[in-house]
């Protein structure tokens, strides 16, 4: 297992990754969200130009229209692979730099597990049944078509659980999740990195 004082928090849409990251931040952890990093990468001039070359209709006023881009890449596997080849190396570099310059404990929230690097830390999978995750996403206002398109591109539960060093069950209440994350934090803090 990687250092337990550096963790990667992942899971399917609606699993509660952001809630876990928020709890860790409140407990004093340094945290970063790969989706936020990805949004920053999409503002990079070279990235905008690369995307404009492939999908010119997704550029509005010199910026990438995320909804327009999402409509393309989440409905076509090949397009998603092209976007990942443009954005993932930059996302990995930025997160790796952040981790190397941040004192532990650190947590990185990642919704696309294929970008996870071993040196980022132990993999914590936030897990909830698909029906629960769908309901949460719908309650947040995610349109059903978008939800199904995004879920079809994500790792399956079996794939996520296979890569997990630690699993946090999030089928229950926010209070139960908070207790589980607090236990993870206490355990993690008691283990010095080797």
Image (cartoon, grey):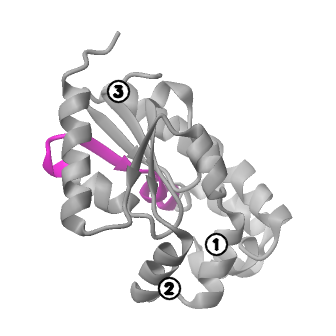
Q: Is residue 38 magenta?
A: yes
Q: In which quadrant is the C terminus drawn?
A: top left
Q: Disc 3 designates what residue?
A: 4
Give residue 167's position: percent from left, percent from top: 43, 45
Residue 50 falls in image quadrant: bottom right
Q: CA distance from mark 1 to mark 3?
A: 30 Å
Q: Is residue 154 left or right of residue 128?
A: right
Q: Between 54 and 114, which is closer to the camera in this rendering? A: 114
Among numbered discs 1 and 3, the one appearing first in the sequence: 3
Residue 143 among those drawn in magenta: no
Q: Which residue is mark 1?
A: 150
Callout 3–callout 2 Cβ contact below 8 Å: no
Say which residue label 2 marks: 142
Residue under the point 70% across and 53% down = 84
Regarding residue 69, the answer to whether it shows in the image is no
- The answer to whether mark 2 and mark 1 are in CB contact below 8 A is yes
Q: Going by the picture, which residue comes out furthest to the top?
A: 194
Local packing at callout 2 (Cα closer than 10 Å; few below 14, some 14-19, many 20+) is some
* Magenta-highlighted residues: 25-40
Which is closer to the viewer, label 3 or label 2? Answer: 3
Q: Residue at x 57, y 46 (%)?
A: 161
């Amino acid at each position: 297992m990687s250092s337990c004082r550096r963790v990667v928090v992942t899971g399917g849409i609606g699993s509660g990754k952001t809630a876990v990251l928020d709890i860790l931040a409140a407990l004093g952890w340094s945290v970063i969200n790969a989706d936020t990093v990805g949004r920053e990468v999409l503002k990079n001039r070279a990235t905008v130009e690369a995307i404009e070359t492939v999908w010119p209709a997704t550029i509005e006023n010199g910026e990438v229209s995320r909804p327009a881009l999402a409509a393309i890449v989440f409905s076509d596997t090949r397009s998603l692979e092209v976007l990942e080849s443009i954005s993932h190396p930059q996302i990995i570099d930025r997160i790796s730099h952040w981790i190397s310059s941040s004192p532990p404990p650190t947590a990185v929230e990642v919704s696309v597990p294929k970008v996870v690097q071993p040196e980022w830390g132990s993999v914590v999978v936030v897990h909830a049944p698909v029906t629960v995750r769908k309901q949460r996403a719908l309650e947040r206002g995610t349109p059903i078509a978008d939800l199904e398109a995004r879920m079809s591109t994500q790792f399956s539960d079996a794939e996520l659980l296979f890569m997990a060093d630690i699993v946090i069950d999030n089928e229950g209440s926010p209070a139960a999740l908070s207790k589980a994350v607090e236990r993870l934090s206490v355990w993690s803090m008691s283990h010095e990195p080797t």
